[in-house]
Image (cartoon, grey):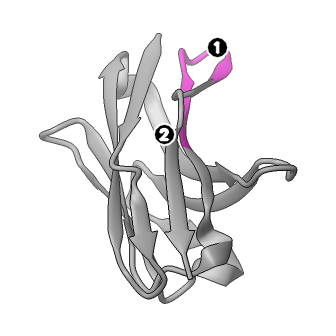
Amino acid sequence: QVRLAESGGDLAQSGGSLRLSCAVSGAIIAIYKMEWYRQAPGNQREFVAAITNKDITTYTESVKGRFTISKDNAKNTMYLQMNSLKSEDTGVYYCHAQYSDLLKDFGTWGQGTQVTVSS
């Protein structure tokens, strides 16, 4: 089993920066992909960025060039560096891990961290 805990959410000014962290514990060796999602009030949860166990990264179009996903395997932590923040980046940010026991794939979510960008 994998457990996730996000932190780093805060109130930021438009144009400012924040760094989110996702601490990972449990069956870390089984993880093959980790992702950040966000959910704004009244909206569905949407994909933001992903990183694989081979460090291949993908981003949703609206954050390309502004956000950077990374991970530190020694610290068992994934990050989301968010620069040039916009009001539309406001929402609860969740990390998600995809992992396998070689027979079946699993997914688990963190509890979320609030990001609020004021214009």
Residue 53 in picture, x, y percent from top left: 40, 48
Residue 106 in picture, x, y percent from top left: 64, 21
Q: Secondary structure at mark 1?
A: loop
Residue 21: say if magenta: no
Q: How many marks?
A: 2
Q: Which residue is mark 1?
A: 103
Which quadrant does the C terminus fall into?
bottom right
Residue 11 in picture, x, y percent from top left: 42, 61
Label 2 – label 1 distance at C-alpha: 14 Å
- 40 sits left or right of 25 in the view: right
Residue in front for this viewpoint, 45 or 88: 88
- 46 sits left or right of 26 in the view: right
Q: Which residue is mark 2?
A: 32
Question: Looking at the rendering, which quadrant does residue 108 occupy?
Answer: top right
Number of the label disc, if any, that sits on residue 50: none
Callout 1 amino acid: Leu
Residue 105 in picture, x, y percent from top left: 66, 23
Residue drawn where x is 61% and y is 69% of the image: 89
Residue in front for this viewpoint, 26 or 89: 89
In this view, 68 is above or below 111: below
Residue drawn where x is 75% and y is 55% of the image: 46
Callout 2 amino acid: Tyr
Q: Give the prevailing secondary structure in the magenta stretch.
A: strand
Question: Looking at the rendering, which quadrant does residue 73 occupy?
Answer: top left
- 11 sits left or right of 36 in the view: left
The magenta segment: 94-107
